[in-house]
Amino acid sequence: MRYTILILLLAILPNILFSQNDEKQLTVKGDSLRGKVVNGETIREVFGNVVITQKNVRITCNKAIQHLSKNEVELIGNVIVTQDSIVVKSAKGYYFGDSEKTYSDTTIHLTNGNMDLLADRGYYYIPAKKAFFFGNVLLTEDTTRVYSDSLTYFEKEEKAVAVGNVKVQDSTTIIYADSLIHFRDNKNTFAFGNVKLVSTENNIQLFGARLEDYGKLKDTKIFGSPALIQIDTAKDGKVDTLMILSKMMEAHKDSSKALFASDSVKILRGDFSSLNNHTNYFKKDEHIKIYKTSEEDKQPILWADNSQVTGDSIDIYLKDSQIKLINIFHNCLIVSTMPKYKFRYNQISGDTIKLFFDDSKLQRTEVAGNVLSIYYMFEDDEPNGLLKSSAERAKIYFNKNKVENVKLYGSPASEYHPEGLVKGKEKSFTLPNFILYKNRPSRNYFLKYFKM
């Protein structure tokens, strides 16, 4: 009898007595309590307006079951854990006094006033101010939402580490990845594995192995053979798809809405394609610039229909998603093939070349500076020799992709070579800088990157 009374007295003594000896000891208060021994363990059940404190932590709930020897408490009903500005809520949970952590296997919600974190279950570690949540995790801050299978949040560093089926969404962008690190203070995000970025503003999708997004700077970098696809609809209703592959891409989400691709860049848009080492794409201005940065750098190559274009720098201007103008600068060369006639190539070179388009069809070419050209002649669709010309300036007019008229200006000179002297010797009629490239990117080559 004395033993039972002693156990009950120990169970109802204020826990302040224990805290004098152990700073990790819990203080538990409530409207009523009941002490008992279960399987040799002393426990205390506290009912109604339960308040549990430890250092700077305060826990409230409807009912608590305190395991005195373990220094642990089972929390039941309207559980609220508060530490400074952090509040953790759940329907039930468990608090471990020695390790100073709380756990819930039901829906758990953490907030610090600026950020909300929700999951099926999770832990919160008091001294470290760290949360580990898992199962349908959702982190919400301002207009940004982070979804994942699991997430570790570090309050002191304002850092979130998400793993598994990660999705980050804001007002203009969605990022998918296998894992991700997000910093709340500077809005920087680093994503890893099967990265996909979707811009809801301009219908652009970017794929890569790793992403660095600097939120406040509005700058995004993608590494690991990144790929871009953009599906546009022109005013005439035609669907036009732009695809770009490279070793690295950088996108700006400011007013310029610019994309920079570098190292082994490949571009495909309708009948237009390119190989180069540097591409700048200004979506707002509908301007694509491809260029070389040094003498050792390879010249960019551009293909349009049956023509190959090379130069040190090439500017492509679009209107309503259709090519309107192409400007080529320095060491310019255009080579046009004729599918019916092998080894017959129309060629023109100069210091600068401008190509004018209407409805994406070439209408006129203007060449300036050291103009040289070779054009094959036809009469009634039959080969009729070629014309070699030189001038300071030239204008070439096209009709249905065929040369209709050529005008030369500034000391023009031409020489005609009859068909009898041309046939079988076509390879000998080339300009000094003639090169025919065979590695034109194909649509099938691009589609395997986008799994289309």
Image (cartoon, grey):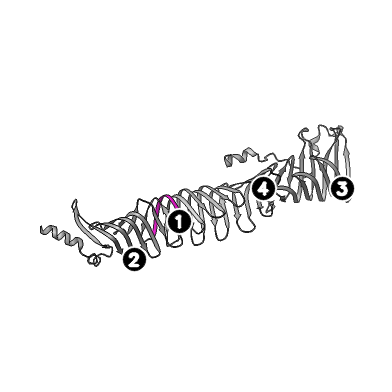
Quadrant of the image occupied by residue 406: top right
Q: Earlier in the sequence, mark 4 or mark 2?
A: 2
* Residue 151 lies in the magenta-colored region: no
Residues under labels 2 and 1: Cα distance? 23 Å
What segment is highlighted magenta in the picture? Answer: 129-140
Which of the image's four quarters has the C terminus?
A: top right
Quadrant of the image occupied by residue 304: top right
What secondary structure prevails in the magenta region? strand
Badge 2 crowding class, 10 Å Cα cut-off, few under 14, some 14 to 19, many 20 or more, is few
Badge 4 crowding class, 10 Å Cα cut-off, few under 14, some 14 to 19, many 20 or more, is many
- Residue type (three-letter) at the residue carrying disc 2: Asn
- List the residue tagged with mark 1: 160
Q: Position of residue 339 (x, y in %)?
A: 76, 34
- List the residue tagged with mark 4: 276
- Residue type (three-letter) at the residue carrying disc 1: Ala
Residues under labels 1 and 3: Cα distance? 66 Å
Residues under labels 3 and 2: Cα distance? 88 Å
Residues under labels 4 and 2: Cα distance? 61 Å
- List the residue tagged with mark 2: 56
- Camera-nearest label, 3 or 2: 2
- List the residue tagged with mark 3: 408
Q: Earlier in the sequence, mark 2 or mark 1?
A: 2
Q: Earlier in the sequence, mark 3 or mark 2?
A: 2
- Camera-nearest label, 1 or 3: 1
Residues under labels 3 and 4: Cα distance? 31 Å
